Image: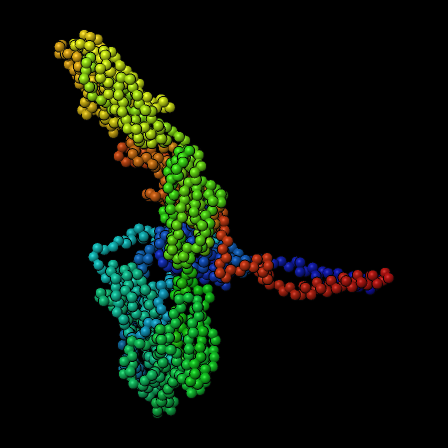
Amino acid sequence: MRKERILAVIMSVLLALSMISATVFAAEIPALDGKLKIQGTAAEGRTLSAEFKEVKPEGVTEDDVAYLWERKTVEDEETEKAGEKPELKELGKDKTYTVTQDDIGSKIVLTVTGKEENGYTGSLKVVSDTVIDAQTAAGQEVKAAEEKAAAADTAEQQAAQETENEQSQNTDASADTEETTQTGVSEDTDTTYQEDSTQAGTENIEGIPAATTDEEKQQSESAGSESVDGIPEATEDGTYGQTNDAADTADSQKNNDTGKTETPTADASIVIGDGNSEVVDFGTVISGQEDSIQAQYVTVTNTGNTTLNFTDISPEHFMVQDISDPMEQNSSQQLWIVPRAGIAAGEYDDTITYTSEEGVEVSFEAKMTVEAAKDDAQNGNGQDDQKTDTGNTSDPTADDQNKGDETPADSTTDPSNDANTSDGGNNGSTTTEVTLAVDDTVAESGLTFKSTESQQITVKNNSAQAVTVAASSTGAAPAVTIDPSEQEIPAGESATFTVTPAENLATDTPYPDNILFADENNSDNKIIVPVNVTIPAPAVSNVTRDPKDGPDFGTLVDGYTELPAPQTITLTNEGNADAVLSDAVSSTGAAQGQYFDITWQAQTVKSGAKATFTIQPKINLTANATPYTETFTITDTTNGKSIPITATVTVNSPDPSLDVSGQLIDFAAAKKGYSEIAPQQFTVTNNGNVTVTLEQPALTNFTVSVDPAQLTLAPGATAVYTVQPKTGLDVGAYSEDLKISSSLNKSITVNLQVVKGNAVLTKIQQPAAVTGLANGTKKDAASLKLPSTVVVETTEGSMKAAVSWNVKETSYKQSSTDAQKFTVSGTVTLPSGVDNDNKISLATSVEVSVNAYSAKVASAENNKITGIDVNGVYTTQTKISFTAVGAGMDNNSPKKGDTRYVPQSWTVINTNVWNAAPYTASFGLAQSGDYTLKVAFAQQQYDGSSWKATGTTDTRQVSFSIAKAKVTAPGTNLTPAANRKSSVKTGDNTPILPFVCILIIAAGAIGGVVFYKKKNKK
């Protein structure tokens, strides 16, 4: 029993220990805190990056966070002031962002979010100053540099004055000592100058890494302030994420004059480094170690309005990059500068000047102090150092002959070998021969990479013994890798090294570097090969369509038998890669199109090539209240972009309509026995949308003629009828209806009165007034519906007499939209057989009324958005194009009072404004989700001379969705997160092994007890 108790106690202890691991909690993952800054100038063409110096916890690197660059426009800031959070335009998710022209006037917002897998959570946000253009930024940098240079000159003068005052107070003994010391230095310096003057030559710019316009190396003050976890800083005016600096920058932009001068002006400026330095200062340079000195840079900007052509220069103590290409106005070039190899010990302060053929000069100051290597120390006897020439010749004049061909790769003079003997009596020198060599072309020009393909360098050992050569990149961030990193080269033989661009280099960005080949047993036996790597961006296709819109096939009539001509679409690949284009997918879901036939087939369009196809409506479309619209989408599978083609056709119901010019043809009266009466004409016009067949005309007492071809009247066509009374008609009144179309119930009345003997005129009856005419009626007798005859009373009874109207002299204005009432005067012509013995005036008149214009009021319901499908689904790589069509925009002959709607702006995330037609736009979205396209239409009214805004607006919208494109980027880890071997970091550093051991022991103890009990039961 005692054993069992002891065993139970032991098991309890072990079980308790095994439970300890369950009480250990993961340490809290630290959240980002502190102050995030944007490194770089918020200016067009500059590259911005994140600065983590003040970010907490310490140790956060650029790889520990995710990046989100966004653009905040002026409209977004107005939204902030209104107390709402704007939807910012996403710009990218890379570590850096290069400012574009579209960003000018806006601010750049950077949000970094800690990666949990790296042990960080939370977010920080920073907002830049207002983005300015490149010219303004360059001007500000030049101004700042000039101000600092002026301040430096003042400080230098003050320091010189103070030094002079101090020296004047020294004792005579100190002055003597100082004079002796200065004399020694002066002689040494003079000798060095004389020796070096024969060796200075024009440098080969390919010997030093090429200049780069990458602004990532330029430092600037913080461009904004931060907020934590996406919550913006509160300000007094209710906005967030803004800084006073940004406001000051915006004010300064308003006063900035960027206008061009009328006359050519040559001018330039120079900025040292990032603009915060007054001099290029290399500090202390150890003789013989010049190749380890990092190049510094100056930036020259053409601030004039004409192209500058700079001449080559060759400073004595420094090697600089020449401006070899013409410099266009407003352009800049970054230029390197390094100390020359083989410069004797001493202090050097040179003014280096670039001069253009146009007379422009820009200068900067370069300083360095050259110290001899430790084994080169002077013995103090005042003797000059004997300079050792380890080049290809011992004759100093040879350097003059090679002036202009010097590069770091073939500069072999090593002053580190200069030494005086330590006995104080004799001067000595040693000569180190460089036995390593490369091909002359490589030595002079270096290696230039325009792709990721490797290149080879052959290094020859010109010595009499084998040499182990180590190959390495001298750059802080190597642009290339060398394989092998070292190898032994037998005497007199050569070895090949393979040079490959480093991985993950940004495209279209120059990466200068140097490759050092050095003898492992003799550091002076070395050569340097310059390298410049620029990996071009991957070739991409870019397919455009012509025409950009449509096609629109106009209007058809239900029952049509003839199709409109097919329209041709041309696709052009303007990119530098072949485009693999898919089949055309209809928005209706039909395999070959529901309303239209399309001849397109999937194919590959090579770079610069074209492909054509046609679209045509189908034959069986019936009348529809709305136009038939179908969008065919062709996808470029190489880049995921889509090419939409939206075809439209309208099918109307048949609407036959005829218009007859007049309702009556009146030949008035004629005396029995009349001769031929002059014929009259009238016209019939087809105002409908279908062809109408007219009836063959036939009358009893009148002859009617018409061109038989005109009896089949197409829409818009006109037929002309000629009518004339037959001769020999007896006394009486003749009136007949001429049928034009029975189906449309169209006819015209023809009248003639034949009288006997002579009659005397007794009265002319007043014609009835003409009323209800439409506004804009033409100014002629027929259009104004003036009667062609009037009734006259005679001694023989009433009869009709012809009348002619003087319409031209009336006050009627056809263009007026107002109601008009006017009188038209006319003259009566008496029929044959009627005498005017009573001298009655033959003048008559008629009153005419024209209605006021009924304005065409456009309905907002007819505003529409075409080219984008309602509830359509697109991808993050789809370019969505659409067109806004305002109601009444097709009113090409407006009158006073007409209204229309004009597209004003459109919004998906940001609001964009249209200032003029065409009212089309394209956009793409990088994030998946549900979106709404909204288009605002502004109502306008015609005032008789121009369209004026009424202040009334209407908004139409289309909802759509964006899905993530299924595109795998090169190098992407396709292993699902759940299957990856690495564990998520929790911040808990407690070792787990002891708890595992305790758990195993406890399990063993439990198993032992079970076994023991079973054994006892047996």
x, y percent for residue 616: 41, 42
User: In the rendered view, would you say 383 is above or below 817?
Assistant: below
Query: Is residue 809 left or right of 270 when viewed as pictured?
Result: left
On screen, residue 86 versus residue 902, left or right, reads right
Horizontal placement of 933 versus 791: left or right?
A: right
Residue 692: x %, y % from top left: 35, 28
Q: Residue furthest top?
A: 795
945 vs 598, nearest the viewer: 598
Residue 277 in the image, given as x and y percentages of width and height: 34, 66
The answer to whether residue 811 is above or below residue 75 is above
Q: Which residue: 49% across, 45% down?
A: 591
- In this rendered view, identify the residue nearer to me: 456 or 473: 456
Residue 10, percent from left and from top: 76, 63
Residue at image point 36% right, 65% down? 212
Which residue is at a point 44% across and 34% down the rendered structure image?
A: 622
**Furthest residue toward front:** 728
Q: Quadrant of the C terminus?
A: bottom right
The image quarter containing residue 623 is top left
Q: Nearer the viewer, residue 235 or 256?
A: 256
Query: Is there any visible trace of residue 962 in the rendered image?
Result: yes
Residue located farthest toward the right when viewing the structure as drawn? 1018
Along the line of sight, the residue nearer the viewer: 156 or 336:
336
Q: Quadrant of residue 711?
A: top left
Scheme by which the image is coloured:
rainbow
Q: In which quarter of the image is the N terminus?
A: bottom right
Residue beneath the point at 40% across and 63% down: 536
Rendered image quadrant of residue 94: bottom left
